[in-house]
Image (cartoon, grey):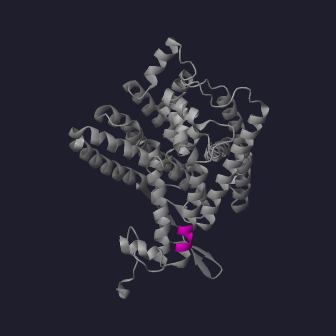
């Protein structure tokens, strides 16, 4: 492994890309510690600790931005407005003819969609920044009497906060695009991943302190490490799992040249929807607990909200069912069997034993439905697994989230994608890759 890492830095182009990517990620992490002007960061941190935001939308949002939301930094919104704009554009592409036309126009259509996504990012960022400013101004004082925002802060604080947070999101979007263009890996995904990974050291430290204080937990911690290894292995297996549908292309003679005649396949992923079903499900199931944070003294609301916490099994069941539903919903939007069948028919392709056109679309849709079921069940299990670890082994909730949920799926998926891009650079230059050998036999 050490030799393979050294090979990365022997290739000048790859070395520049890796160093550039690391430098951009350092800039992102530094910006995550610069507070918005006029904010009492200590009072805000105390308020979040008082409400225990781990099971609310605030906690979910803070996870994606690497703790910047709780500190109210200039990167508090993170890259999430861009993700929201991208999802909205993708959903509109399934129902609005204009966006459907753009998706079929090739490179020019992609450029137009990218431009619209950027405009949407600015609009969503400004709206969310205004909401954050109103939220901060209305926070009550902490138990020690400190205010997050000094009383009497008027329109000036709101305007300053909106400009600062919106510019922070635009700058992060630019950083992500620079990584995709001049670095290695998908820039937006890497920024999300680094925000999630940034929380791991603190979680491990708290678990280590608990291990020191409770000496009887040595065997438990070893068993937890064993579970962590196999959980990550299972996520990699399902993330990489595909169902290959064989496709053949008929030979066509155009002039003096013969086109087609080759055999290929359609790789259909087990988890076509990726991590989006978990994000959608958690966004919905966190709403009751989030509302309850604003009614701290209302016993009726608190009694209802307590059933929507991860300590109760009904919470696990509801979230699991929501994930299964959103897996099928998002898969239907992300993968259209009719378009795939039409493209195959235009280029003379067919699935052996299946008639082109409508029958091909039905065949692909049937397979997609079958492989989505185990994928959705796995996503539901991996999402509720941290709650099981937290309740059974009595570990810190932040440490338990490492065992599953949105964070683990994003980290594993982005890491695999980045490794595959590094792998391609190594194999092109006949270096041994990370996952398979790339040298020609005659050179050994």
Q: Is 357 situated left or right of 428 in this image?
A: right
Q: Which residues are magenta?
A: 15-19
Q: Quadrant of residue 187?
A: bottom right
Farthest-out residue, bottom: 442
Tell me if residue 162 can be seen: yes
Q: Is 286 situated left or right of 34 in this image?
A: left
Q: Main secondary structure of the magenta part?
A: helix
Tell me if residue 366 can be seen: no
Q: Is 219 situated left or right of 245 in this image?
A: left
Between residue 35 and residue 396, name the one nearer to us.
35
Compared to residue 114, the image places residue 251 above or below, namely below
Q: Position of residue 321 (x, y in %)?
A: 44, 31
Between residue 268 and residue 120, name the one nearer to us.
120
Between residue 56 and residue 105, name the one nearer to us.
56
Q: What is the quadrant of the C terminus in the image? A: bottom left
Q: Quadrant of residue 178?
A: bottom right
Q: What is the quadrant of the N terminus in the image? A: bottom left
Q: Position of residue 429 (x, y in %)?
A: 48, 80
Residue drawn at x 28%, y 42% is 212
Q: Any magenta on residue 258?
A: no
Between residue 317 and residue 23, name the one nearer to us.
23
Q: Quadrant of residue 35?
A: top right
Q: How many marks?
A: 0
Residue drawn at x 51%, y 55% is 355
Compared to residue 303, the image places residue 112 above or below, namely below
Q: Position of residue 397 (x, y in %)?
A: 39, 36
Residue drawn at x 25%, y 37% is 214
Q: Position of residue 105 (x, y in %)?
A: 71, 58
Residue drawn at x 49%, y 45% is 275
Q: Is 39 situated left or right of 399 in this image?
A: right
């Amino acid at each position: 492994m050490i030799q393979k890492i050294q090979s990365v830095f022997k290739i000048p182009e790859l070395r520049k890309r890796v160093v550039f990517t690391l430098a951009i990620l350092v800039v992102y992490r530094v910006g995550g510690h610069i507070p918005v002007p006029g904010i009492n960061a200590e009072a805000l941190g105390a308020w979040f600790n008082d409400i225990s935001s781990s099971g609310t939308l605030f906690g979910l949002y803070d996870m994606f931005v690497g703790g910047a939301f709780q500190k109210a930094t200039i990167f508090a919104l993170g890259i999430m407005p861009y993700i929201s704009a991208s999802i909205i554009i993708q959903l509109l592409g399934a129902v609005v003819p204009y966006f459907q036309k753009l998706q079929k126009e090739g490179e020019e259509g992609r450029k137009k969609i990218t431009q619209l996504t950027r405009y949407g990012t600015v609009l969503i960022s400004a709206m969310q920044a205004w909401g954050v400013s109103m939220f901060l101004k209305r926070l009550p004082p902490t138990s020690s009497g400190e205010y997050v925002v000094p009383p009497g802060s008027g329109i000036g604080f709101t305007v300053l906060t909106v400009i600062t947070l919106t510019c922070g999101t635009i700058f992060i979007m630019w950083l992500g695009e620079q990584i995709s263009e001049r670095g290695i890996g998908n820039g937006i995904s890497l920024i999300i991943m680094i925000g999630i990974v940034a929380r791991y050291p603190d979680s491990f430290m708290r678990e280590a302190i608990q291990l020191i204080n409770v000496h009887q937990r040595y065997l438990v911690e070893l068993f937890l490490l064993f579970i962590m290894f196999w959980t990550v292995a299972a996520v990699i297996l399902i993330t990489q799992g595909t169902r290959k549908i064989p496709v053949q292309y008929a030979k066509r003679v155009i002039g003096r040249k013969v086109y087609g005649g080759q055999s290929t396949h359609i790789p259909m992923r087990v988890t076509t929807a990726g991590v989006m079903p978990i994000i959608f499900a958690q966004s919905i199931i966190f709403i009751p607990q989030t509302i309850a944070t604003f009614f701290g003294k209302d016993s009726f609301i608190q009694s209802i909200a307590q059933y929507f916490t991860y300590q109760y099994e009904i919470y696990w069941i509801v979230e699991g069912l929501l994930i299964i539903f959103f897996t099928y919903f998002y898969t239907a939007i992300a993968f259209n069997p009719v378009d795939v069948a039409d493209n195959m028919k235009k280029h003379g392709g067919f699935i052996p034993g299946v008639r082109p056109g409508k029958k091909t679309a039905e065949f692909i849709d049937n397979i997609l439905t079958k492989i989505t079921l185990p994928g959705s069940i796995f996503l539901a299990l991996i999402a509720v697994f941290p709650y099981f670890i937290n309740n059974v082994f009595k570990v810190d909730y932040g440490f338990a989230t490492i065992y599953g949920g949105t964070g683990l799926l994003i980290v594993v998926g982005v890491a695999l994608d980045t490794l595959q891009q590094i792998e391609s650079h190594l194999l092109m230059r006949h270096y041994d890759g990370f996952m398979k050998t790339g040298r020609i036999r005659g050179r050994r």
